[in-house]
C-alpha cells in the first residue's frame, strides 16, 4: 500500500504509472533519467500542495497500483537500485 511516506524512488520503481500521474499533477519525479530523492509528501509540499491534495494523490496512486495502465515498456525496467 502506498502512503505519503513512500520514497519517490520506491514509488517510481514499484508503480510505473506513477511517473505520468505525478507529472500530470506538476510534480517532477524524474530528472535526467534518475528518480528525485525524498518522499511523496516532501515532493508534493515543495510544489505547494496541502495535506488534502496529498491524501488524494495517495488514494489515486493506490488505485493506479491496483489497476495499472497498459505498460508501453512491457515490464522492461532499469533497476535503479543496482546502479552505482
Image: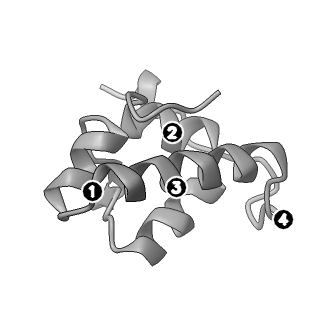
Disc 2 or 3, which lies upstream in sequence? 2
Residue, disc 1 = 50
Give the label on residue 11, or none: 2
Residue 76, placed above or below residue 69? above
Of residues 81 and 7, the one nearer the viewer is 7
Q: If the image is split into quadrants, where does the C terminus sit?
A: top left
CA–CA distance in space, label 4 to label 3: 22 Å
Residue 5 appears in which quarter of the rendering? Answer: top left
Q: x, y percentage for residue 44?
A: 28, 54
Q: Are marks 4 and 2 in contact (CB under 8 Å)?
A: no
Residue 84, placed above or below residue 44? above
Secondary structure beneath label 3: helix
Disc number lying in front (2 or 1): 1
CA–CA distance in space, label 2 to label 1: 20 Å
Residue, disc 4 = 70
Disc number lying in front (4 or 3): 3
Q: Are marks 4 and 3 in contact (CB under 8 Å)?
A: no
Task: Decide if residue 72 is on the left or right side of residue 20.
Answer: right
CA–CA distance in space, label 1 to label 3: 10 Å
Amino acid at each position: 500500500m502506498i502512503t505519503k511516506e513512500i520514497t519517490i524512488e520506491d514509488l517510481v520503481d514499484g508503480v510505473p504509472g506513477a511517473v505520468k500521474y505525478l507529472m500530470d499533477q506538476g510534480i517532477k519525479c524524474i530528472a535526467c533519467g534518475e528518480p528525485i530523492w525524498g518522499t511523496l509528501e516532501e515532493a508534493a509540499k515543495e510544489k505547494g500542495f496541502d495535506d488534502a491534495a496529498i491524501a488524494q494523490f495517495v488514494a489515486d496512486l493506490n488505485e493506479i497500483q491496483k489497476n495499472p495502465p497498459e505498460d508501453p515498456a512491457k515490464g522492461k525496467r532499469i533497476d535503479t537500485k543496482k546502479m552505482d
